[in-house]
Image (cartoon, rainbow, N blue to C red):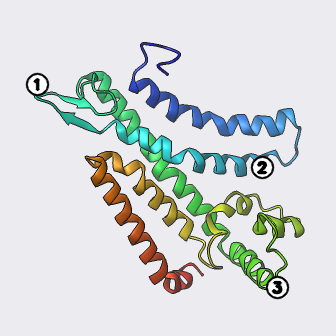
């Protein structure tokens, strides 16, 4: 924002980065429906919007969390660590904190929750598709295919837009592990966006490494349990 408006601050960045993505799904739908005239505009727009929201989730969550990250200096005041000439008090800061709270409910809470609901609705269908992919991979039929899950869905002429919207969340895991993609999503957020509250680069790197190690241990030790739970 500072490149366009010299008076722009971190708060300008916060508003732009959190509000613009809310309009993008509508623009995506308008492209499919009004420009392409596609009768399947609704499912296609939903698929693309889910993928877009997953892509920008980390950056939007980070800027939302940065609104709360303040440091105390020798003058006794707390300043925003993202822009040290902004004090962490006053009506402007409090207003942006309120906005950030709303955006936290929308993005790091709302987006994964939406994905979880979609995954839950399609849990049996995703398991069936993954079992087909695994079986055909063992026969060597899909080894050269870039996206085996989408390839199977195309062969079946599967019009399930909800399933297509979330393949990136379950296609890397064993059949039945439909919910593990949400766990992996939060692991990525813990390794990036949540680190804004951790002081010092060395401590940040250490915490991120510990989170990654715990995630690996959890994934390996609970595969059987989660498979049974998500079945």
Q: Is residue 215 above or below residue 111?
A: below
Q: Residue at x 83, y 38 (%)?
A: 33
User: Rounded to the nearest whole Å, what is the CA distance between mark 1 and mark 2?
Assistant: 54 Å
Say which residue label 1 marks. Answer: 75
Q: Is residue 148 left or right of residue 175?
A: right
The local crowd at label 1, few if under 14, some if 14 to 19, many if 20 or more residues have their Cα within 10 Å, is few
Q: Is residue 102 visible?
A: no
Q: Is residue 16 above or below residue 61?
A: above
Front one among 131 and 228: 131
Q: Is residue 174 visible?
A: yes
Say which residue label 2 marks. Answer: 44
Query: Helix, strand, or loop for circle 1?
Result: loop
Q: Is residue 64 above or below residue 171?
A: above
Front one among 130 and 142: 142
Q: Position of residue 197 (x, y in %)?
A: 29, 47
Q: Is residue 226 left or right of residue 49?
A: left
Q: Quadrant of the C terminus?
A: bottom right
User: Rounded to the nearest whole Å, what is the CA distance between mark 3 and mark 1?
Assistant: 69 Å
Q: Position of residue 145 (x, y in %)?
A: 81, 67
Query: Helix, strand, or loop for circle 3?
Result: loop
Closer to the chain start, of discs 2 and 3, is 2
Q: Position of residue 150 (x, y in %)?
A: 79, 64
Say which residue label 3 marks. Answer: 139
Closer to the chain start, of discs 3 and 1, is 1
Front one among 132 and 83: 83
């Amino acid at each position: 924002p500072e490149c366009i408006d010299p008076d722009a601050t971190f708060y300008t960045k916060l508003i732009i980065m959190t509000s613009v993505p809310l309009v993008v799904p509508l623009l995506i739908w308008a492209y499919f429906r009004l420009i392409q005239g596609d009768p399947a505009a609704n499912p296609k727009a939903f698929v693309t919007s889910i993928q877009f929201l997953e892509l920008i989730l980390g950056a939007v969550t980070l800027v939302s969390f940065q609104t709360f990250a303040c440091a105390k200096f020798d003058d006794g005041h707390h300043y925003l660590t993202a822009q040290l000439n902004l004090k962490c008090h006053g009506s402007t800061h409090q207003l942006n904190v309120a906005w950030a709270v709303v955006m936290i409910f929308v993005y790091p809470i709302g987006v994964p929750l939406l994905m979880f609901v979609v995954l839950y609705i399609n849990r049996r269908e995703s398991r069936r598709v993954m079992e087909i992919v695994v079986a055909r991979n063992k026969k060597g039929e899909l080894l050269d295919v870039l996206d085996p899950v989408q390839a199977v869905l195309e062969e079946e002429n599967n019009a399930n837009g909800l399933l297509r919207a979330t393949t990136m969340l379950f296609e890397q895991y064993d059949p039945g592990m439909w919910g593990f993609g949400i766990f992996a999503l939060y692991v990525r957020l813990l390794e990036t966006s949540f680190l804004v509250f951790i002081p010092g680069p060395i401590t940040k790197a250490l915490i991120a490494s510990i989170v990654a190690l715990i995630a690996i241990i959890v994934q390996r030790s609970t595969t059987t349990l989660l498979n049974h739970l998500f079945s």
